Image (spheres, rainbow, N blue to C red):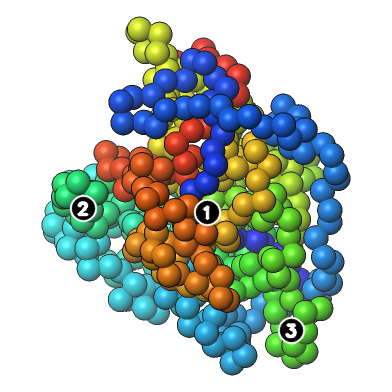
Amino acid sequence: MSKKHLLVLMAMLLIAAFAIVGCSNEEATTDETDPVETTPEDTTDTDSEGTDDSDETPEPEQVDISNAEYVGSDSCAGCHNAQHSGWSETAHPLMVQNVEKNPDAIKDYTRELMEAELADWENSEFTTIGGDNEGKRLTSFDELVYVVGGEWKQRGLIRTEHGFNFVQFQANPEWVAADGEVTPARLNSYGGGQQYEDRCLGCHTTGFDYEEMLANQDRRGDDDYYFEDFVGELGVGCEACHGPASEHVSSPSADTILNPANLTAQQELDFCGTCHARNTGQIDPATGEPMNHQDSIFYKWGDDLYDHKYVTSIARAENVFVRYDEDGNVEGYWDTDGDQRFWADGSARSHRMQYNELEANVMKMNLDFTCSTCHDLHDPSTLKGGSWEALISADLERNGTDQSCHQCHDTNWDIDEAMPYKAMSANGVQDMRQHTFGTVTIGDVPEDDNE
């Protein structure tokens, strides 16, 4: 592959609890289940966007890997077996999988849910492709080339003349809420017609080469056209966070690999936000104009995320609008694409919004607190669905240091109060914990005039 810009795709955001900031928007409301919003005293010298003006943001430690190539996560296992083994058990490697090579990548719940739909594919809403595909439909699992996800939900991709399109289904497994209420496995309508490589691929793969993708535009629809032609690795691999590792493999040294530990707290949050910040598009660095990409294909080590993305931000009141009900109460917050992204209290309604929530509390207070304070990308116990039990335990350690919530909180701290399940991986099911920790700082969000 040609030389690549480092595509940073760090992930699975922090789950902790700590001192929290208050709400600066007097119109924001809470329901009876929401924690009371209070405004703590904070004397930090910040501007209106919550950034510290006292010091210039330092440049991250410079490591020149401009000539390195992507070699794949398996190349790391020889020297870093424990980290590789832990990473392999997280959801990151599974973000997008080639089902022609690995049919088992299709989850059992997806097969069970879609079997009835495929039996009557001509009449099923979940077999449609949409977009400019002239009524093309999925007629069997054999037509799927890739699946996306599988931990919280799973979607399918089919080859069309335009590239790879989402089939109009999202399969969600059974969900058991904290109160014991069971939501059966179900299908939701999603994304038919969306072009995956033109919107999402950079965050679900490692070493995505944008220029190489453009060079392969004319091959879209060909039987031998695959993502593997212009990405280093399917899924979020080691090099998604550490950069292309060919030089490090041949000459192991701190000077031949990137280490996220060298980033400042804000840089790390931006680093993770490249894929965990809900946005309405990317900024084309050549023209300054919007691009449809939700991923961060031009982001470089240590960059400011806002230089690259139109982040949906209630903290900065950017790319977001507020709507009121007939009684004048805040109904929620919508992005500029017309999708509701925040509940009335400022917590996230959608998945993949950890950055959007954190910038309304952690970043506003300039806390030296990052995703890695709670999450270890090499440890599945701090990332996947069962991580909450590990993180609220009193004995979770990493390198001899308490990594649990109790590094800051006593044993009486209640995660269900501080981080209730509010965000949704599918319509109608709140199955993802919020990262507002009870209160948010909401900027002067304009009203939606197009409601």
Q: Secondary structure at mark 3?
A: helix
**Quick check: 430 above or below 121?**
above
Mark with earlier residue (3, 1): 3
* Disc 2 from disc 3: Cα separation: 44 Å
Question: Image quadrant of residue 30?
Answer: top left
Whether residue 220 is visible here, answered yes or no, is: no
Q: Secondary structure at mark 1?
A: loop
Mark with earlier residue (1, 2): 2
Tell me, yes or no, whether the two marked residues, 3 and 1, touch with CB atoms within 8 Å.
no
Task: List x then y, in percent, for residue 337.
Answer: 51, 30
Q: Closer to the observer: label 3 or label 1?
A: 1
Q: How many marks?
A: 3
Mark with earlier residue (2, 3): 2
**Quick check: 269 above or below 383?**
above
Identify the residue under disc 1: 408
- Which of the numbered marks, if any, corresponds to residue 248? 3
Give the residue type at disc 2.
Val
Front-most of residues 412 and 118: 412
Residue found 45% across the figure and 36% down from its top: 438
Whether residue 73 is visible here, answered yes or no, is: yes
**Quick check: 340 above or below 264?**
above
| Crowding at mark 2 (Cα within 10 Å: few <14, some 14-19, many 20+) | few
Q: Closer to the observer: label 2 or label 3?
A: 2
Task: List x then y, in percent, for residue 8.
Answer: 65, 61
Identify the residue under disc 2: 176
